[in-house]
């Protein structure tokens, strides 16, 4: 797992809504990085973890992977149905 001590020295530009230089921002970063590592190690199929690590795919908001389906809270089934309708035109 990533060394959490390194997070204190890394510039936090991942989320524009959180000041990574504050105590709460640091705690949020710890939680975010821990969740990403947990999801890669225990939740994702190993082939997808490897593809993500190797840069072949990108899993957006990997830290929220077990909590939401998309960062925008969009119902994917509805999204794909609309997409199919638009593509049929």
Image (tube, rainbow, N blue to C red):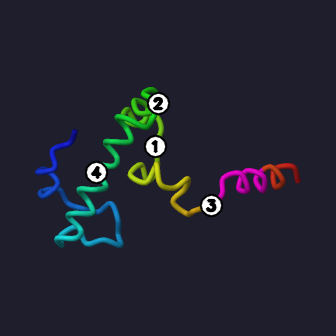
Which label lies toward us, 3 or 1?
3
Q: Regarding mark 3 in the picture, which secondary structure is present there?
A: loop
Residue bearing the label numbered 2: 45
Q: Report the side of 44 relative to 22 (left or right).
A: right
Quarter of the figure with residue 30: bottom left
Residue bearing the label numbered 1: 58
Distance in Å between CA atoms under marks 2 and 3: 23 Å
Q: Regarding mark 4 in the picture, which secondary structure is present there?
A: helix
For image coordinates 51% across by 55% down, the residue present is: 68
Precedes in sequence: disc 4 or disc 2: 4
Q: Regarding mark 1 in the picture, which secondary structure is present there?
A: loop
Distance in Å between CA atoms under marks 4 and 3: 24 Å
**Residue 19, above or below 6:** below
Q: Main secondary structure of the magenta part?
A: helix
* Mark 4 surroundings within 10 Å by alpha-carbon count, few (fewer than 14), some (14 through 19), many (20 or more): some
Distance in Å between CA atoms under marks 4 and 1: 16 Å
Locate residue 69, reporting x and y percent. 55, 53
Which label lies toward us, 4 or 1?
4
For image coordinates 62% across by 61% down, the residue present is: 74
Distance in Å between CA atoms under marks 3 and 1: 18 Å
Region in magenta: 74-83
Residue bearing the label numbered 4: 33
Precedes in sequence: disc 1 or disc 2: 2
Residue bearing the label numbered 3: 74
> Is disc 3 in contact with disc 1, using a CB cutoff of under 8 Å?
no
């Amino acid at each position: 797992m990533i060394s959490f001590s390194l997070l204190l020295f890394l510039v936090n530009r991942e989320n524009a809504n959180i000041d990574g230089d504050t105590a709460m921002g640091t705690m949020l970063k710890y939680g975010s990085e821990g969740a990403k590592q947990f999801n890669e190690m225990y939740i994702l199929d190993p082939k997808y973890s490897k593809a993500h690590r190797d840069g072949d795919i990108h899993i957006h908001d990997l830290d929220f992977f077990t909590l939401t389906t998309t960062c925008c809270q969009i119902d994917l089934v509805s999204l794909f149905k609309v997409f199919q309708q638009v593509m049929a035109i």
